[in-house]
Image: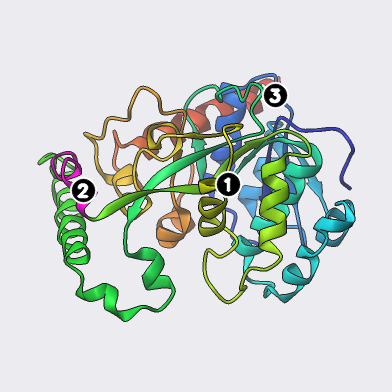
Amino acid sequence: MLSDDSPDFFFLWSGDEFSHLFRMAVRSVRMHNPSADIRVYVTGRWPDSPNFEGMTSDGCASVIRIDADDVIDLLPAHLRGVADLYRKLPTHAHSARSNILRYALLYLHGGVYLDTDVLMLGAFPERGEADALIGTERVWKGDGDRVAGDASVWLRPSTWGWAVSWALTRADSYFFAGALGLAHRLARISDAWMTSQANNAVISARRESRFMERLLLSAAHADPSVRYSTGPTLIDTELRSAGPDVVALGCDSFYSVPPGESYRLFEDVGLSLPPDAVAIHVAASNHPVRLSRMSPSDTQARRGSVVNRVVESAWGAVKGVEGAATR
């Protein structure tokens, strides 16, 4: 049941495939924000997963079942148009449904929303008097056109530049653990095929945020058949017309590694994160096999890689909590 008070941080979950990494994501927030009120809201049936059961017993967050219709019904009348869109979304479209609910919950209660594949590295930045705070990431310029079905994107020089860059970086990461430093070298000329775009994996907002209100109003008219239409595409479009009370942090803060290069978080042992990095977005949809196999004894990442270090650190903290509880 949704309470009237506001969490400091919250996650949303639906489905059964709850990875060990997602459990560590929750713990990583607790590690760096020890006094925070952290909640995991569950929609649909209770997940049948040992990792989910472990997460509930870790004591890092309150786990609360909520009903999407109840959440939307709490919105002011002029924002309830998203209910029709939500019902049109297939039940397996967990990300698209989560987009609607995160905006609604942020509008109702404020706080910080995090995807379950976001690992915290430090204390979350203060929002101050800002209406909302989001982060930007580096993405391929042609990705939006590709998703929209524009075949001409494959004929553009920028597309070939991106493809060659990706292939070289991927090979360096996979075969040489990033020792050749190709990602760093190619980043110097990546403006030719990359651009900055807002992402909604991390959002901080005040209660009744005007920016969240605009997202909900726009989402009600989004095409549910188009990927990202209620997610990064929507939030990036609204950001471009937002006022100065919406703070957009640079890529270094939450998304220092582009989502298309998220394999580097698992493989590149020489990867050095910027000093401003307070989180990393693992982009779980790019690594379904890795995450399904991840366990406390196998992080599915090279020793010394970012994911290996962060997950092992979080697991060590969890074991400390469990040990204290049994003494």
Residue 1 appears in the figure: yes
Q: Main secondary structure of the magenta part?
A: helix
**Residue type marked 3:** Ala
Q: Nearer the viewer, residue 195 or 171?
A: 195
* For discs 1 and 2, the disc positioned in front in the rendered view: 2
Instruction: Report, in whole angstroms, how far the alpha carbon at label 3 lies from the one at label 2.
Output: 38 Å
The residue at the point 62 percent across, 73 percent down is 224
**Residue type marked 1:** Asp
Q: Residue 171: x, y in percent?
A: 16, 55
CB contact under 8 Å: marks 1 and 2: no
Judging by the rendered image, the residue that carries numbered circle 2 is: 190
Judging by the rendered image, the residue that carries numbered circle 3 is: 36
Q: Residues within 10 Å of mark 2 (few under 14, many from 20)?
A: some
Q: What SS does tag 3 mark?
A: loop
The residue at the point 13 percent across, 40 percent down is 185
Q: What SS does tag 2 mark?
A: helix
**Part of the protein shown in magenta:** 183-192
Q: Nearer the viewer, residue 254 or 82?
A: 82
Q: Earlier in the sequence, mark 3 or mark 2?
A: 3
Residue 115: image tag: 1
Q: How is the image coloured?
A: rainbow
Q: What SS does tag 1 mark?
A: loop
Q: Earlier in the sequence, mark 3 or mark 1?
A: 3
